[in-house]
Amino acid sequence: MVQETLQRQINETCRSILQNVSSPIIETLQDNDVRHISVDAVYMNNLAAQCNTQCAKDLACYERLAISIPRGTLFGSTYLADKGRAVTYTVSTSYELSTDYRTVCQSVGINQIRYAVYLLVQANAHITVPASIQNVQYTYCIPVCETLYSAEVPNVYVADDNGTDYLDLLPD
């Protein structure tokens, strides 16, 4: 139940924050047609801080819940799980959130490169019910933006058995 709540709440919160996001990718082009790609770190840090703050506010309403469960559930045995009368327990949950971002530059073909920026939200929930404590971890990877750069198709493409790729080895 806690993991589903975490997933749903983080998804809703981050989706609402990311709706009006512009691209954090900074591209500079040199005279020799070389592209330099970088990420606006200040922009991504502000975005991560916004998501962290808003997720913490949204999860605060789930810190204390009253649930009714059979007493047999507390013993951890599947045989006893549905035994005994239902008792209402107060479940205390504390959340730790951390946000970060990561970039991925991945070759998707012999003439294309995909560059993507992801926001990482990691949540740890510590659940305390009478007689047990459990931890739930959840990591959510949210794509912020991605772009695909295409170049000319090479004249020759050779791949050897060791996985080494050789481009344009032969003269024109």
Image: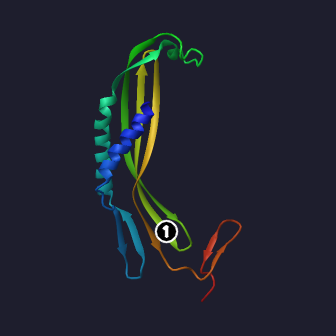
Which percent across, then down, holds residue 122? 41, 41
Identity of the residue drawn at 30% across and 37% down: 58
Q: Secondary structure at mark 1?
A: strand
Label 1: which residue? 113
Identity of the residue drawn at 37% across and 78% down: 30
Residue 103 vs 88, above or below: the answer is below
Residue extending farthest right: 161
Which three-letter amino acid code belongs to the residue tagged 1? Ile
**Quadrant in the picture for residue 36:** bottom left
Q: Nearer the viewer, residue 20 or 87?
A: 87
**Residue 98 seen in the figure:** no
**Quadrant in the picture for residue 54:** top left
Residue 16 vs 136, above or below: the answer is below
Which percent across, then down, holds residue 18? 32, 52
Q: Nearer the viewer, residue 57 or 171?
A: 57
**Residue 139 seen in the figure:** yes
Q: Quadrant of the N terminus?
A: top left
